[in-house]
Amino acid sequence: MTNLEMSRGAYEAARIAGNGRLDLRVNGNPKPAAAVLRPTLTALSALVFPAALLGMWTLSSHFGWLPAQILPAPDQVAATLADLADSGDLWFHTRISLLRVVEGFALGGAAGLLLGIAMGLSQRVRWTVEPLFTALAQVPPLGWIPVLMLLVGIDEGLKLLIIAKAALIPVALNTHKGIRNVPDSLREVGSVLTFGPWATLTRIVLPAAVPSIFTGIRYGLTSAWLALVAVELLASSEGLGYLMVWGRQLFQLDMVIAAMLVVGLIGFALDWTLSWVEGRLQRWELAGS
């Protein structure tokens, strides 16, 4: 008997046993229909608000509620987006922005990881660094632009430092929190196994703190992306933020909205991907607890 025939036989047996209704089972237990449909309904409900906004936008442009110079029609924005893609300008500015955020996030994330580990492991380092770190963390990344402009100018160094600062704070805080929350019982296991400081850190402390550390990485990347667009709006001649400024100077709001859509989609994709990975890590943590 082939696999296909076996699958058909199982289907017919389930249908007959359920008087014509398919009995969905998970691990031998019936799975309610609501549990099957819930993910689909959740995904559809998430599209309601964007669809309503798009409908209002379309009606506004059709009936002229707002001038086209202020709110271009959706088809005009789509045409501008297609033109930017065909000309290569969209890919050029997107590549520049992504390269900047990768470099800045790598610098800030690495520094935040090291600082968080140091504060989490050493009480002396925490007492010495934490007050100043907390005070500096209260200043938003854009608040550092006037000072950094005097130190490094308005070239790539400014953008790199602003993005790195935006990523450093969440990564350091969550790494510190994750290491401090590692149960003492796990550390005692390292002592029983005669682990040294390095083995305890790499085999016990860091693996136990991975979910919290990854949460910091997720928020750090989100903060880095937001800081990137903001600094490109203020001091840049390339990138998606500059593309929005250029469209505003030309009074081409369709270009501005097209760039905004690309920024939003990339930010959503980055956050969704890291959120999915974070969910997997949390599932492993619950399975191991």
Image (cartoon, rainbow, N blue to C red):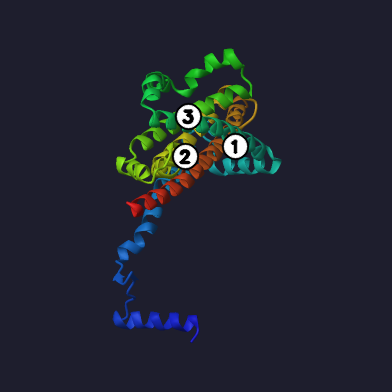
The picture places residue 145, in percent across and down from the top left corner, at 53, 18
Q: Tag 3, which secondary structure?
A: helix
> Image height check: is 125 above or below 6?
above
Number of residues whose C-alpha sits closer than 10 Å to that of mark 3, classed few (under 14), some (14–19) or many (20 or more) = many
Give the side of residue 160 with respect to residue 135, left or right: right
Q: Nearer the viewer, residue 194 or 173?
A: 194
Residue at point 61%, 41% (across, down): 81
Number of residues whose C-alpha sits closer than 10 Å to that of mark 2, classed few (under 14), some (14–19) or many (20 or more) = some
The picture places residue 177, in percent across and down from the top left corner, at 36, 34
Q: State how far apart marks 2 and 3 are (Cα).
A: 42 Å
Question: Is residue 230 something that shows in the picture?
Answer: no
Dividing the picture into quadrants, the one containing residue 134 is: top left
Name the mark on residue 98: 1
The reply to whether the C-beta atoms of the residues labelled 2 and 3 are less than 8 Å apart is no
Question: Is residue 159 something that shows in the picture?
Answer: yes
Q: State how far apart marks 1 and 3 are (Cα).
A: 18 Å
Q: Tag 2, which secondary structure?
A: helix
The residue pinned by badge 3 equals: 168
The residue pinned by badge 2 equals: 60
Dividing the picture into quadrants, the one containing residue 104 is: top right
Count of numbered marks:
3
Dividing the picture into quadrants, the one containing residue 219 is: top left
